Amino acid sequence: MSLTTLPDEVLNDIAFALVASSPLGPPTDLIPLLCTSKHLNRALHFKKSTGLYARIARLKFDCNAVKRRAFKPYAKDCAEQLVHACLCIQFFRRGNVDDDDVVDHLPTAFMLMLENDGKNRAQLEWAGIESFLDQFVRRRLYDNRMTNDGWPLETPHSSSALWLTWMFATKEKITSQSPYQQTQLYRIVSAFALVPFRYASAYAPPTHFDLPLSASNPDQQHELFTPTPHGSYPLYQQGAPANQVHFRSRPDFAVGPISIPAKLLFVAQQESHPFYAPHVPLDRADADQQGRIGPTAEDLREVNTHQGAKYVRQVNWDWNAGVARYLDNGKVAPEDASSMWDCDWWRARQCGDLWQPMPRWRVGTVYVPGSLSGLWQGRWELTSEESHARLLASPAYPPAFSGQTLYAIAQPMFMRLTEHHYVAPPTISTSNPNAPSSIQRLAGPIPTPKAEPAIILTDTGDHEEVPLDMSMQNAWIPGREGGVSWEANGLNSGLRDGWGRDRFQATPEDVQERETITFRLDYDQRGAGYVYETWDRTKKGVHDLYDVFGQSAASAAAASASSSSNASVHEPPSCARCKKRAALLARMRKGDSEVVEKIFERVGLGMSTVGKQCSKPSANDEDEDDEDDDDEIDLDTVWELDGFNVDPPSSSCSTDCGQSSQSECSADSEDEDDTEMEPELRGQPRARNPYTGQVYEATRNIADKEYLRPCDGVEDVLLTGEARSSSIFFLVDEKHAQAWNKYTFYGRVRPWDGLVGILRSAGNPINHLFFYGYLVGGETLVGNWRLASTDPFVPTWESAFVLSKREE
């Protein structure tokens, strides 16, 4: 028996086993086999053996992240991604940092690392990406800077380079650099990290809370600027997000501000040199005995043992065991190790265009409720205000600029934060006409900031009245700086209809409910306040209790039916938003089912023709068993339902479907040409292959229906923090207050992109600081601080901070 007589399925297995013997790198072992004969070449051709190349893709690269985040990839999806990823690692393997194609491959590598569950990192390491990045950052990151007054340019590929440098960084690599290398890297990242009037710190400036900017947002419809020697301020992300190749979908993807990885690398460089002060007291007891306030040697040791710029925990693939392992201890990593980047991924996917209307139902989340509760420690950079002003006055890049130019000094920082959520109460219907039809909350959520009309000077010299939102000065909460107070367990003052007096009477005794907190604004004379729920992972929240209600109501209904009682039966409280979500999904699935049925009817296989039958999946490709177009989410339908008037895709079968006859356009040919049942992508309808220049249409949607973001009931997120021991506040951290001063913290999370804003109150409003930034990798808070009392639309004394959550 020869190879030419073997069935194609057996040939595929042989080819896969051959590739599996050398899992690192492109599947080059197939080349000799493909060259053996024309028969084998045809049998194993990429277009014919899609299932084989999909298996190879899953062998060599990580495919679970896309399945978790957006859709279950088809065989064709994985096969195309295999080609895309292999071209990428081949590029880095060549090691030519001067190749112009670097602008395409660096963002691709960044996307691969956002999906890394062990395999992607292993492939990129095999390709030598760490050496490539080191050379690129040191040699080319400042390319073409003379076109920008000498300042380095921020581009998607330069931002990707710094992100990747951070993702591959370890403490050992940072500390093992020579003094020259450390100084060089310190200087390279300083401009991006410390000059906020040159480089954006967020996808949209913190001067906006309500986003996106659109006609549906009457208070905030403008990009508002102030002219400076360095250009307009505040800074907005420039250009449209890039259209990336990703598993046959073509999503818009905005890499994000280069300042974020620059801050992480800058602080990591600093943290390689620990704090040292030989003349401070040994510990707190020694300080008390000497009558001194401030840090002790014990406090400094605590600071030095924690990384504010917490390195990404390295996960690599064990090819022999078939599992991912942590490089630091060799322990098996979870299968979804890439989930730490889920919010960063969706921020890049959904927040690249602040003019793009936001649908009511997003596919992914940019912030996970509860992420900020805990003790945060790190550093904030205290720069010279005078040096900062001099730098602002001249647009030219200073010679040999670095953190030392601004006299940047790292200051230890602690914040113990607690998170509070506004969860809207449910609508409760009842058969009793005298009962209230709903539960209404008198207080909450805290109003979103309102913009006040102001006259500005436009670029043409004209005066125009525009709405200005100044609430950034108070962490996006209406009122004056420091004008927010709160107290725990204030629920009774915030609800009516008796629901608030005893919360949920049906809640079982063994269920622990989360505490509540009442916020009050100094300008608001209402006595009720604003009632929020304090997040606690060990207790049930209001939204969590709906299931409990449902079970209790079912028991009550059964008991009522058995006793033939005429008493009114109340429906269990439930989340109105969850009901709307379920109804939307049902409508979309029904619409898709009707489209599919029409296609079957055209070929004589409709339900009315052949009866209710379930066709068996094609055995041509074992990787396509569950490829059901009904699972794909029609985002255009979502947008139309939300009032955006987006035309739905045509439900008719395309005339250029690629089949020889109409009878061949059936469900069994889905993987050969499945574009007829799939709606067009939202965003750019055409994408260009970055390697060949070929322009082609997207061939699958960006998400499946089941990935429509679940409702968690949270409509607003507030933060509180306190460093005093004698107060009504329950967030107490006296130990760190004695060492690093006493402050009060409160803030809010911007829902559009998950930007965190925190006001640090120090008594005197002149000393109030506004901290704003993103959670990176789910455990590091990276951003800027600035004087809160200054005009938000004018550059002021501002610099970087980096904090990470401590395990307690």
Image (cartoon, helix red, strand yellow):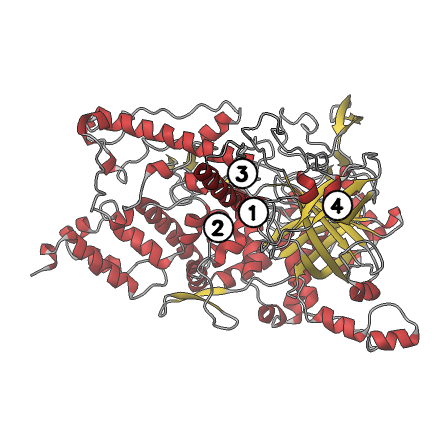
Q: Quadrant of the N terminus?
A: bottom left
- Report the amino acid beneath label 3: Pro
Per the image, the residue denoted by label 3 is: 572
> Toward which corner of the image does residue 663 lie, by quadrant?
top left
**Do the residues bearing badges 2 and 3 touch, measured as CB atoms within 8 Å?**
no
**Disc 2 packing (10 Å; few <14; some 14–19; many ≥20):** some
**Disc 3 packing (10 Å; few <14; some 14–19; many ≥20):** many
Which one is in front, 753 or 696?
Answer: 753
The spot of residue 423 in percent (x, y) is 63, 41
**Do the residues bearing badges 2 and 1 touch, measured as CB atoms within 8 Å?**
no
First of labels 3, 1 by sequence position: 1
Measured in 3D between alpha carbons, the distance from the residue under mark 2 to the one under mark 3, in whole angstroms, is 44 Å
First of labels 4, 1 by sequence position: 4
Outermost right residue: 291
Per the image, the residue denoted by label 1 is: 544
The spot of residue 135 in percent (x, y) is 54, 60
> Toward which corner of the image does residue 186 lie, by quadrant?
bottom right
In this rendering, the label closer to the viewer, 2 or 1: 1
**Do the residues bearing badges 4 and 2 touch, measured as CB atoms within 8 Å?**
no
Which one is in front, 309 or 585?
Answer: 585
Q: Is residue 656 visible?
A: no
Measured in 3D between alpha carbons, the distance from the residue under mark 2 to the one under mark 1, in whole angstroms, is 34 Å
In this rendering, the label closer to the viewer, 4 or 3: 3
Q: Residue at x 77, y 71 (%)?
A: 299
Per the image, the residue denoted by label 2 is: 111
Measured in 3D between alpha carbons, the distance from the residue under mark 4 to the one under mark 2, in whole angstroms, is 45 Å
Query: The residue tagged with tag 4: helix, strand or loop?
Result: loop
- Report the amino acid beneath label 2: Met
Residue 745: image tag: none
The spot of residue 294 in percent (x, y) is 85, 67
Is 387 drawn above or below residue 666 in the view shown? below
Residue 490: image tag: 4
